[in-house]
Image (tube, coloured by chain):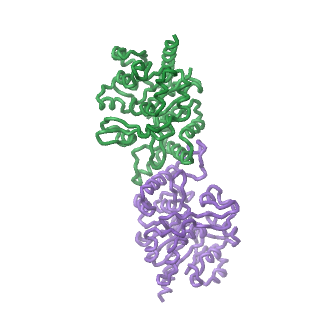
Chain colours: A green, B purple
Amino acid sequence: MKLVALAGGVGGAKLVDGLAKILHADDLTVIVNTGDDFYHFGLYICPDLDTVCYTLAGLSNPETGWGRAEETWNALDNIQELGGPSWFRLGDRDLGVHLERSRLLSQGQSLTDVCSHFCASWQIDHQVLPMSDDPVATLVHTNEGDLPFQDYFVKHACQPQVSGFDFVGADTAVPAPGVIDSLWAADFIVICPSNPWVSIDPILSVPGIKDVLTRSANLKPVIAVSPIIQGRTIKGPAAKMFKELGIEPTAVAVARHYGNREHGGLLSGFVYDDLDADEQFSLEELGMPLFKTNTIMKTIIDKKDLARKICQFGKSLIDKQVN
Amino acid sequence: MKLVALAGGVGGAKLVDGLAKILHADDLTVIVNTGDDFYHFGLYICPDLDTVCYTLAGLSNPETGWGRAEETWNALDNIQELGGPSWFRLGDRDLGVHLERSRLLSQGQSLTDVCSHFCASWQIDHQVLPMSDDPVATLVHTNEGDLPFQDYFVKHACQPQVSGFDFVGADTAVPAPGVIDSLWAADFIVICPSNPWVSIDPILSVPGIKDVLTRSANLKPVIAVSPIIQGRTIKGPAAKMFKELGIEPTAVAVARHYGNREHGGLLSGFVYDDLDADEQFSLEELGMPLFKTNTIMKTIIDKKDLARKICQFGKSLIDKQVN
C-alpha cells in the first residue's frame, strides 16, 4: 500500500517517523512544506524539511522536536557577542547543514536534489520531497503588519494577532519533481497533524497539488489527522490562529477547514483524538468517515500505533470505494 | 611614540600582541593583509584579520596560533558528513564571526567598519585596520597552475612549486580609511615577521601605501623583522617560496627583498635573529642599521621583549635622523 504524507514541522515529523517505521521505503513519500524557508545570514534555511529529515534520521533533539540532538551553540554565542541577531536559534550542527545546502544551491542544484543527497547521507530510505523547488514564502497578516513567517513564528514568538495568510510565489510555483507522480501513485494520502494554516495550506497552494488530490480520475482517500486536541495543539500556534480568525479551535474546525470531499472539500476521512470524544456528534454532521484514537505521540510506540491505525483506516476507505 | 605595524597572520599577530602590550592604545595601529580573504560557503572570511584580532583579544588558539581557543567543530563535521568541502577548517566559534561579518557586509558596511565594530566587542583598544576595503586577491602562480591563495595555502598545503604572485584587484584598490593617515602620523613603521611574498607584499601593493613609506616629506624609519631564522620559518611557506623562486632563504634574502631605502628600497633598519649571527657580514653589506636579538616568540614575555627592543631600535633610528 503506497502512501503520501503531507507534513510541516514537529507534529508532522512525528507521524511521518511512525509511518516510516512501519512502511517499506518504496511505500512512503513525504511532501514537506517549504513555505517557512528563509534566508538568514545569507544561508538558505528549511525548518520543516530539516525537522522531518532530522527526525527520520534519528538526529533530532528529542526534547524540542526541532533542531539537532547534542547540539552546541558556539557560533550563535559568538554572533550574539558581536551584537548580531540571535533570535533564530542556529545550532552548530544545524549550521553545517545550512552551509552545505546553501553551497549546493548556489552551485545550481535544486532543493529536491539537495534534499535527496542529504537523505542519502543520513541513510533515510523513504522519499522526502520539498513541495516545490520554487520559492513560496508564507506571509502572516497580523495586527502588527505583514510578517515573514519566521519573523512571526520565532522573532515575535507567535504573539501578533493573525488575520490571514499569503503564500507569496505560490501562483507561479511548480511542484517539485516527484510530487505529482507520488500523489498519482499513492493508494491514499495522509495530511499529518500539522498546522492547517501555515504547514499544510502552503503545500496545497502549489498549483497542481490540490488538483491531483481532488481529480476524479485519480480519486483516492485523503485522510487528515487533527492537530487540535481539546482545543489546543501539542506545539505551535494553530489553535491561537483559529481563535484569532474567529473560529473555535476544535477538531471539527480542522475537519471543516479541509472540508468533506463530497461537498467540494478535500477529505474522505478524518482522524481525531480520544480526548475529543465529545466532538463526535459535531464531526458526524460533516458526513465523512471518522476514526477516533490516541493521536498524542510521546513515544515511538505511540507514533507507530497511530501510523498503523491510519493505514487501517485508509485501507478501510479504499475497500469501501472498491465495493 | 606612534607606531604602525604591517602584519599578516600568525607571526605578525605575535609581534603585534607584544607591541599592544607595551604601547598605549593611541600609539599603535596595525594594518593587516586582506589578500588572503576569500568567500567560502558564501561567507566572507578574513584569515589574517581574524588571527590578529583573536590574538589581541586573547581569544586565539594558543597551540595553532590561528583559530579560536576551546573551539568545537560540529558544523564542519556535519558538512563533512554531507560530503561537503572540509579542507578549510571552519570552527564553530570562528563561524559565528564569519556569519556576522558577512551579514554586516551584505548590509553595506565596509570591512573597516565591521573590523572596528568587532574590535570594540572584543575590547581591543588598539586600532586594527584592513589594508583596503576593496577586494585584493593573492593569486599564487605554481607548477599546478594559478591558485587562489587559500587553495594554495590550505587545500594544497603549500605543496605546489611557486613561480610568482599576483595581487588581483590591487591596481584599483584604495587604502582603507585610516591607513594613510596612520602612516603619516607614525613615528616609525614595523614590518612584522610575516611572509614577505604573500602577507606584506599584498599590503604594499595597495596604491599609496608604499608611496607614503618612501615619500621624502614623510620619511620615517621602516624596520622589518625577519620571518626567516636559520633558513626556515616558524610557520608558513616563506622559506619554501624563496627557494622555489631561486633565492636561498636567509635573513639577508628578506632584507634584500624589501631593500635598503637608500638604494631605492623600503627599509631603514632590519631586525634578525641571534641564531643568524653568521649572516652579520652579508647583512652589513646591505648598508643599513641592523639589530640582532631573539625573535622567536614562544611566550608573552618573548613577544614583549621583542616589541620593546624594536621600539628602542626605532627610537635610535629616529634620533639618528634628527641628529
Foreground pick, B207 / A66: B207
Location of residue B20 with respect to B85 vertically, above or below: below
Q: Position of residue B163 (x, y in %)?
A: 68, 67
Q: Position of residue A6 (x, y in %)?
A: 48, 29
Evaluate whether residue A18 shows in this view.
Answer: yes
Location of residue A194 with respect to A101 vertically, above or below: above
Query: Residue A244 appears in which quarter of the rendering?
Result: top left
The residue that appears at 49% across and 38% down in the rendered structure is A68
Dividing the image into 4 quarters, which one contains the N terminus of chain B?
bottom left
Query: Residue B12 appears in which quarter of the rendering?
Result: bottom right
Q: Position of residue B77 (x, y in %)?
A: 57, 45
- Residue at the outermost bottom position: B323
Q: Position of residue B147 (x, y in %)?
A: 63, 60
Evaluate whether residue B1 shows in this view.
Answer: no
Foreground pick, B63 / B248: B248
Foreground pick, A144 / B116: A144
The residue that appears at 44% across and 31% down in the rendered structure is A204
Would you say A25 lies left or right of B212 here? Answer: right
Location of residue A290 with respect to B68 vertically, above or below: above
